[in-house]
Image (tube, grey):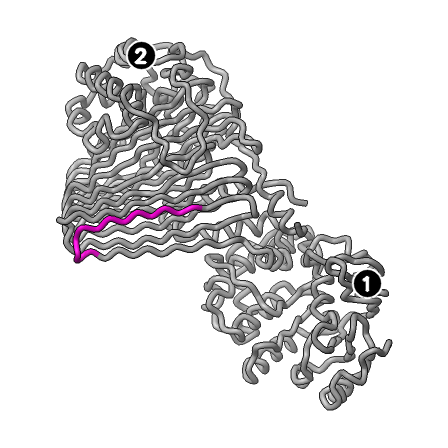
Amino acid sequence: MSTSAQEIENLISQEYKQGFVTDLEVDTFPPGLDESVIHRLVKIKKEPDFMLQYRLQAFRHWQTMPEPDWAQLHIEPIDYQAISYYSAPKSKKDGPKSLDEVDPELLDTYKKLGIPLDEQERLAGIAVDAVFDSVSVATTFKGKLKEAGVIFCPMSEALQEYPELVKQYLGSVVPVGDNFFAALNAAVFTDGSFVYIPKGVRCPMELSTYFRINAANTGQFERTLIIADEGSHVSYLEGCTAPMRDENQLHAAVVELVALDNATIKYSTVQNWYPGDKDGVGGIYNFVTKRAECRGQKSKVSWTQVETGSAITWKYPSCVLLGDDSIGEFYSVALTNNHQQADTGTKMIHIGKNTRSTIVSKGISAGKAQNTYRGLVKVAKSAVNARNHTQCDSLLVGDKCGAHTFPYVEVKQPTAQVEHEATTSKISEDQLFFCQQRGLSAEDAVSMIVNGFCKEVFRELPMEFAVEAQALLGISLEGSVG
Amino acid sequence: MLSIKNLHVSVGDKPILKGLSLEIKAGEVHAIMGPNGAGKSTLSHILSGKPGYTVTEGSVTYFGKDLLEMAPEIRAREGIFLAFQYPVEIPGVSNVYLLKAALNAQRKHHGLPELDAMDFLTLVKSKVKLLQMDEKFLYRAVNEGFSGGEKKRNEILQAALLEPKLCILDETDSGLDIDALRIVSEGVNSLRNAERSFLMITHYQRLLDYIIPNVVHVLADGRIVKSGGPDLALELEEKGYGWLEGRAA
C-alpha cells in the first residue's frame, strides 16, 4: 500500500465528541416487555384511554411479527426483554413549568451539546424541544408560537391537551402493524414532538427537536407527528446524540407527517448517534420509520437527512403522494466509517395525478463500513403524468469499504417518466496529492472532497444545520494523520 | 535555494533517477528537457513529495533544510508549487474555496492570521485581473469541465495567489494550442521576479520561445547529461536527443 492509501486509512478512525454521560437521578423501569409494562407506561404518562387500546393492539400485533431480515445488514440478535422501556430524569414536581425548574444538570448537558435551551441565549429564532431518554425536558418559544396558533409540544403533553387531534392523525400514516419496529414503537413510545400548523399559517420560526439518549440499557422510542393544515408551511429540524457505551442501544422511532392542500413540510435530520468504537463495539441501532402523506392537492414534503452516526441505520423516509400535483423530495447524505452499516433510502409512492418526486442520495463509505442505498419508486395506475428523477452517488474512501445500490421501480401508468442515474467513485490518490501540494493536510483534503461530493444535499439544509453538517462530516472522518 | 546532489530514486525495484545533481539559485529559470522515460516527471514528483518513490541515495536541500524529510503539504506551505501536467477535477468544490483553504493553510503555517472572506476576495480578484481571466472561473468547481487550456491557466492562478518560491512546471505546454500556450506563458512570465525560481519540464523547445530560461538541462537515463544556455534547446530541436544519451554531464 502506498503512503497516501495509508493516510486515507489513518484518516478514518474517528472521535465522538458527544459521548459523555450525564449523572442524574432517574426513574427507570426494570428491563422487560409485557402487557403490564404498557399499562404502567400509560398510567405514568397519564394518557387518555384510547392510547391503552392503541398500544395493546400494537403490542399484540408485534408479538406475531418476525424481525425483518431483508436489509443488507449484519445485526446481532436483539434481546427485547433485556431492554428497559422507560427512563426519565426524576422530577421534583409534576414536570417543569418553565426553564427555571429544569434540572441545571440537564441544562448543562444541552449546553455542552451546543444547544442552549435558555431562550434569551438563542440568537437565531429556533424553537427547541429537548427529549432526554424517554421524556421531553423542555420546549422553548412556546408562547411566541402559540400567538401564531402553532402547536409545538412534547407528544406526552399533546396527548393530554389535544387528545382529539392526536387521535385523528396518530397512526394514520404509519399504521400500528406497518412493520416490526413501527409496531414496537406504537406499543411503547414514550415521547417525541407534536406539531400542528393551522390553516394558512407560515410557521414564524424553525422548529427543532433534539434527541439525547443518556441512560444505559434503555431503548429510545420516540414518536413525532407533524400536521400541516391547508396552505401552511413549516420547517422542522431534528438532531440526535448519545453517550459512548460498549453495549448496543436500540432506537426505534416513528415519524409521521401529514400535508393537506397546498401545505409544505420541510423535515431535516442530522443524525449523529454514537456509532460504536473503531472496532465496532457499541453504538446505536437506529431503526426508524419515517413517512409523509401528501394528502392534499399541491402539497409538498421534503426530507433532508445527514446520517453520520449509529452502528446500524435502517431508515427509509418516504412520501405517499396522494394529492394531485403533490411533490415529494428526498435529499440524503449517509456517511459510514469503521464498522458502521447503513441501509437507507426512500420510497416515493405516486398515486395522485401529476405527482413529482426527486431523490438525491449521496453515500460515503470509509473504513470497513458498508453503505447501502435502497429505494422504491412506485407509480400507481391512477398517477397520470407522474415524474420521478433519482440520482444516487456513492463515494468510497479507502479500499476496505463497500457501497451497494438497490433501486426498485414499479410503474403501472404508461404516461409516467422515471429516471435513475447512479455513479460510484473513489477519492483518488491524485486528488489527495493535488490538495496536499496546495498546502492542505490530508485530513482537510478528504473533508473538502467529501463536502464537495455532498454539496447538492447540503444546500437543501437550513443555514445553521448546513454548517453543523459540514463540521460533522469533518469530525466523522477525523483521524490520526501526521 | 535548491540543491540536488547525486540523487538516486526508484519506483519499486526500478531505478529512475541515477545520480542527478542540480543547483538552482533564487530568481533563476531552469528548463529540463529530455526524451520520454528519462525521469523528468519523477523529478517533479520527488521534489513535491508525491508518494510512491524511494530515494536510495543522495540529498535535496531547500533553503538549507532537508526537503525529503518534509511532508508534501509542508513543502507546499514552504513555497514549493507544482503546476500539474494533468490537474485533477474536484467535483462540488469551488475554485474559490480551494484557493482560500490553500492560502490560509500557508498563512497559518507562517504564523499569519487567516484572511477573512472579504480580504481574500479582494486579493484573489486582483490576481484574476492580473492574469486577464474571467471572475466566473472562481466559482466553478475545481477543473470540472475545464478545457485543457483552462486547467493550465487555473494552475497559474493558484501559483499567482500562493506566491511560491520555487515553481515547478510539469509539461505545462502539453495539450495546449498556440493561443493557449501564449496566454499561459504570459501568465508565467508575469510571475517572474528576482526571488522566485522556476523549474520547467518540457519535451519541446517551443515553450522556451515564450518563457526564456537562464539554463537548459538535458535529462537522459536518470542523469543530467548536458547543460547550457537557451541555445542548447535550439540545438536539441535540430539534432534530437540521440547524440547525448549515454553521456554524463
Crowd rating for badge 1 (residues with CA inside 10 Å; few <14, some 14–19, many 20+): many
Q: Chain of mark 1?
A: B
* A92 magenta-colored: no
Q: Secondary structure at mark 1?
A: strand
Is any part of residue B228 visible from this angle?
yes
Q: Is residue B47 above or below residue A280?
A: below
Magenta stretch: dominant SS? strand
* The one of A164 and A2 positioned closer to us in this rendering: A2
Is any part of residue A111 visible from this angle?
no
Q: Which mark is residue A34?
A: 2
The spot of residue A143 in percent (x, y) is: 27, 28
The quarter of the picture where the C terminus of chain A appears is top right
**Which image quadrant for residue A257?**
top left
Mark 2: amino acid = Asp
The spot of residue B174 in percent (x, y) is: 60, 76
Q: Chain of mark 2?
A: A
Q: Which residues are magenta?
A: A404-416
Q: Residue at x 27, y 49 (%)?
A: A409
* A406 magenta-colored: yes
**Which image quadrant for residue A192?**
top left
Q: Secondary structure at mark 2?
A: loop
Q: Is residue B178 above or below residue A435?
A: below
Left-right relation of B103 to A301: right
Q: Residue at x 51, y 49 (%)?
A: A396
Numbered disc total: 2
Q: Are marks 2 and 1 in contact (CB under 8 Å)?
A: no
Q: Residue at x 69, y 68 (%)?
A: B41
Q: Which mark is residue B219?
A: none
Q: Which mark is residue B8?
A: 1
Mark 1: amino acid = His
Label 2, label 1: how far apart the Cα atoms are: 75 Å
**Which image quadrant for residue A414?**
bottom left
